[in-house]
Amino acid sequence: MNRIINEKSGSDKKVLMIVIGGIHGNELSGVKAINNTFSSLEKSNISIHGKIIGIAGNLQAIEAKKRFLKYDLNRCWTQEFIDETLTKPSELCEKEDIELKELYHLISSLLTEGYQQTIIVDLHATSADNGSFIVNAGMPAQDSVVKSLRLPIVMNLDDYIHGTLLRYFKRPSVTAFAFEGGKIGLDKTAEVHTYGLWQLMTESGLIDEQHDLSMILHYQELIGSMKKGQPNILRVLHRHEVKPQDYFHMKPGFDSFQFIEKGELLAEDKSGAITSPIDGRIFMPLYQIAGDDGFFIVEEV
């Protein structure tokens, strides 16, 4: 697999859409969705009002089907760490150092190409059920492109998770967000990502609406089946950090946005029981080995 999975350009500079899949190498739905989208674009011969480019995130972790190999490639995007990595001799580079360098240069170059609107979509999947939502990188919740996906929007996760790629590349002129399609490994997750990308291309004006009505209708059907009882806009209240050698174990059966009560048993680690410190909704409970976010607690706003 190449870093650039595929790209397609038109004659004007209206919209640049950068789609990233597999920055966590075990979350392969994004890569599959990018391939599906470009295959459909080629077959339909649709005119592009700008440029769409699909990028593979952590190539070596994708090949290994692991979240990461040495360090999390979506927790390292701070200026200090980037400056240090860019000047590191190649013989001293970790595997993710190489990935970071290539992504940094590629995305930085794309952002200089002078498009009227730039959108960065980072495709992810979760280890828990009910995992379709948007993580907003500092944008207004009413952004029309983001709202068009009709999924729950989590507003302030970057206050609790530091060093994300989206936060680093966020600009006043850039719409940047994570699109969580669902649970890792499910065909439906790749389907949500694939048809969601068509929704985004249409809403942004990258393609003309009349070309993809069947795609849009299918996406609306997918989301409609999941939307019942879902919150609209949420904010994070609490994060439970998992450290190496904690032996963290999430209790089974929790789904994102499920209501929980203060004092409810959520997980266990080497120190014993972990209970909820507040009332709220549980968010992204950790049901995989790799990861330092045990769970979050959110509330609707």
Image (cartoon, helix red, strand yellow):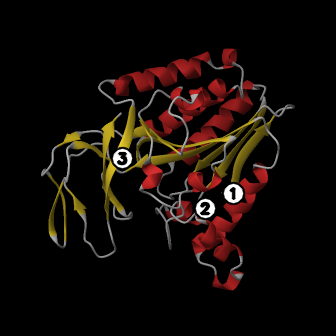
Disc number placed over residue 228 in the picture, else none: none
| Label pair 1/2, CB-CB below 8 angstroms | yes
Which of pointers 2 and 3 indicates the residue nearer the eye?
Answer: 3
Q: Which of the two discs, 2 and 3, labels the residue nearer the N terminus?
A: 2
Q: Give the alpha-carbon distance from disc 1 to disc 2, as whole Å.
A: 7 Å
Side of 157 relative to 32 (left or right): left
Amino acid at circle 2: Leu
**Which residue shows up at 54% across the image and 63% down it?**
73
Q: List x then y, in percent, for residue 101.
A: 68, 67
Q: Residue tagged by mark 2?
A: 59
How packed mark 1 is, by other alpha carbons closer than 10 Å (few <14, some 14-19, many 20 or more), is some
Q: Amino acid at mark 1?
A: Arg
User: Which of pointers 3 and 1 lies earlier in the amino acid sequence?
Assistant: 1
List the residue tagged with mark 1. 3
Q: Which residue is at 61% across, 37% downward?
A: 36
Identify the residue under disc 3: 236
The spot of residue 12 in percent (x, y) is 85, 31
Q: Earlier in the sequence, mark 1 or mark 2?
A: 1
